[in-house]
Image (cartoon, grey):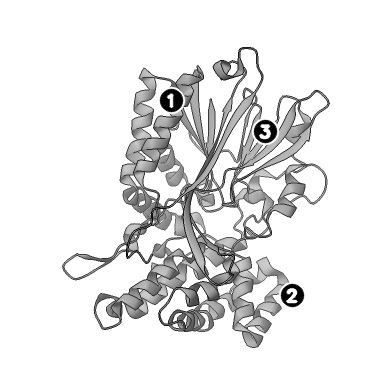
Amino acid sequence: MLVVISDLHFQDTINDVIKDEQGNILVDVQRNIFYEVFETTFEELRSLARLNNAQELIIVLAGDIFDFNRSRQWFNYDVRPYDEYSSDKWGPIAVKIFDDIVESNRQTFDCFNKLLEISSNDVKIDFRYIPGNHDRIVNLYEPLQKRVRALLGLNGEGCFEHEIVMEKYGVHIRHGHEYDPINFAGEIPRKGPFVVKNEEYDLAPLGDYVTIDFAARVAFEYRKRYEKDMKCGPDQDEYRLIYRKFLEFDDLRPLTAIKKFLESEMADKYMAWKFLLYFIFTMALPRALESEFVCKKLGMVKFYLLRVFAVISPQLLINYLMRNQSTGQDSWYLPQRSYIQREPILQNAQYQYLVSGHTHNPAIEYLRRRDDGKEEFFFDTGTWRRQISRCCDNSTFGRAKTLTYVAFYSSDEDLPRAGGNKGYSFDYWSGYNKREIAGEVF
């Protein structure tokens, strides 16, 4: 039995919490998945494995598991995991981020360890790991690779694979940022077989810059400017609320709706928007216009447009920045479909299933029915993060948590449900949940 999960985006939220001088928490930050979700899911997977006579349970963590980009620790230094900085410069910072991610999610990773411990008395259980764009740097720094292996109980050494191919299940797995030119810096094949050179995964994409020095940095700069007001004052609740909104807006879809999002959820509709403009024009934009990395990634024409937008329209500039953080839920699937249909693995009759995540948009695509009667599918494994989506009225926003995984069974598994002789099979589960709490504003 093979299970694929992606886009858990574990963060080091302990550094985002605001406390008073006595250590009491004033602003708690819950950005990670509660450990109880993993307890329930892992028990469910074990039950499925037993039910289907599985001899193994392989859980593939298919990228963006550890979120190195959304960390305030980068702002204590001038070094970044892109541009011309070498790993000996940013590596120690990344190790500290990783250690704090583990500490922020201690109970969750205890669940991972317990799952591995019971595998000797039950179905054999193993994890596999693929880096995505938010944990791209794991493959660039050996101490990170060792920490990931120790945490997940992985054998071996050196870099992790970018694709996992498992003939036993007829499955090909990748993270999926390879289909996204904003978050993959390598050459994306526009025609012919979709083949990516291994060394191109190491290159830093423009999306890293926008996520770190725009999306993640907004909340950091806001806190630095208004932390005293958040701790004490007549408007402390409003200041705290704005801080939380800046921490969560990267869960927003579409990202270009940031202005309406801030205005719709504030008592003072202009307070957060004014700070965002202040941040862009006094901090983010000057830094971007001085960055050779940004110039090189955008090209001279787009770099010039960045300057033009800054003069003509703040809203145009923000939309431009947001589109360069992610291609977004609204427009992603048209180019993706053309890429996945050109995956060369589909020329091999032993493979029927393609899997990736990255988009945070769970989906299943029916690719084609072969002459031999077998069917090919593509699965998007979505995310386990909360999503904030624009409502149908185009002026308000709703929230729900998502959870998606896909389970594959080999020809000698899943026999009870198949009635004996069978080929490959799968279960695709994707759902949403929400618990409304009285007085909850975050």
Is the C terminus in the top left, top right, bottom left or bottom right quadrant? bottom left
| 340 horizontally vs 207: left or right | right
Question: SS at mark 2?
Answer: helix
Q: CA distance from mark 2 to mark 3?
A: 40 Å
The residue under label 1 is which amino acid type?
Ser
**Residue topped by disc 2:** 301
The reply to whether residue 212 is visible in this rendering is no
**Residue topped by disc 3:** 353
Q: Residue at x 62, y 60 (%)?
A: 328
Q: Position of residue 112 (x, y in %)?
A: 38, 36
Nearer-N-terminus badge (2/3): 2
Q: Is residue 364 above or below residue 300?
A: above
Q: Is residue 66 above or below residue 50?
A: below
Which one is in front in this view, the residue at disc 1 or the one at disc 3? 1
| 369 horizontally vs 258: left or right | right
**Residue topped by disc 1:** 47
Which one is in front in this view, the residue at disc 2 or the one at disc 3? 3
Q: Position of residue 407 (x, y in %)?
A: 55, 31
In this rendered view, identify the residue nearer to me: 263 or 90. 263
The residue under label 2 is which amino acid type?
Val
The residue under label 3 is which amino acid type?
Tyr
Q: CA distance from mark 2 to mark 1?
A: 56 Å
- Say which quarter of the image contains residue 235: bottom left
Nearer-N-terminus badge (1/3): 1
In this rendered view, identify the residue nearer to me: 96 or 207. 207
Q: Residue at x 53, y 32 (%)?
A: 3
Question: SS at mark 1?
Answer: helix
